[in-house]
Amino acid sequence: MAPPAAAKPSGFAALGTGAKIGLLVLLLAVVGALYYFALHMSLAEEIEQAERRHRTLQGELVQAEQRQQEYLAAVQELADREAIDRQNKRMLPEQAEMPSFLQDLNRLAELSGLRLRHVEPRPEEPADNYVRLPVALGLSGRHHQVAKFFYAAGRIERIINMENVALTEPVQSGDEVTLKVDVLATTFRRPTTAEAQASAGTMTGAGGAPGGAR
């Protein structure tokens, strides 16, 4: 009795070697394509988004640094203006501050070695943009002491004018000459808002009615 015939292979086993290799290559290509589209493109998109975000952040950083520089410049400008305003207020205060001014004059006289004979504050004299505060001084001392007094008066922060200087009664004492000095020491202050408005109103009225009563 003849033996039964062997069963023919089917499916993948039935394929030839070349077909199997081609199928394997196709499978690898599909897997590679899936990897590229599923992973590589996603990563590339994320990298591109990250680069765009990085460029945006760099631009925002530059703008922030510019704003910081502008802020620091504005703060410095404000500080400079405040310092100038404080200096201006010391030179031309808003109030008369006569006790302080008289104390300064007395201190300058003592430091210069002069004798202060009398101090006579005079009435205020309003002007357009300031108010004059004259003080009549009587001093006595030597020439170099008088010169030292005037020099020191010009060095203090507050504005002082030395006017109507009169040197009288010189007395020789050895190599030195002692004399009397009479001077009008004038300082200034800013007019108040009410004084400035009144002055402006007076000027307006005077300009609107020329030839009127004086």
Image: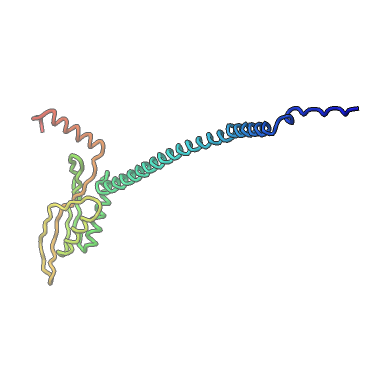
Frontmost residue, 18 versus 67: 18
Q: Position of residue 103 (x, y in %)?
A: 26, 54
Residue 100 sits above or below residue 65 on the image? below
Return the x and y of residue 188 as percentages of the image width and height.
21, 46
Can you name the residue that lies furthest to the left here?
211
Quarter of the picture holding the N terminus: top right
Vertical side of 145 occupied by 32: above or below: above
The residue that appears at 58% across and 34% down in the rendered structure is: 36
> Which residue is outermost to the front?
1
Q: Looking at the image, which residue sits at the far bottom? A: 174
Q: Nearer the viewer, residue 51 or 31?
A: 31
23 and 131: which one is in front?
A: 23
Q: Is residue 106 above or below residue 8?
A: below
**From this viewpoint, which residue is outermost toward the right?**
1
Q: Quarter-wise, where is residue 171 in the image?
A: bottom left
Query: Where residue 62 sits: x, y (%)?
Result: 41, 41
Q: How many marks?
A: 0
Q: Quadrant of residue 156?
A: bottom left
* Lateral position of residue 77 relative to residue 161, left or right: right
Say which residue appears at 74% left-offset and 31% top-offset: 13
Look at the image and tell me in which quarter the C terminus lies: top left
What residue is rendered at 19% in x and 35% in y?
199
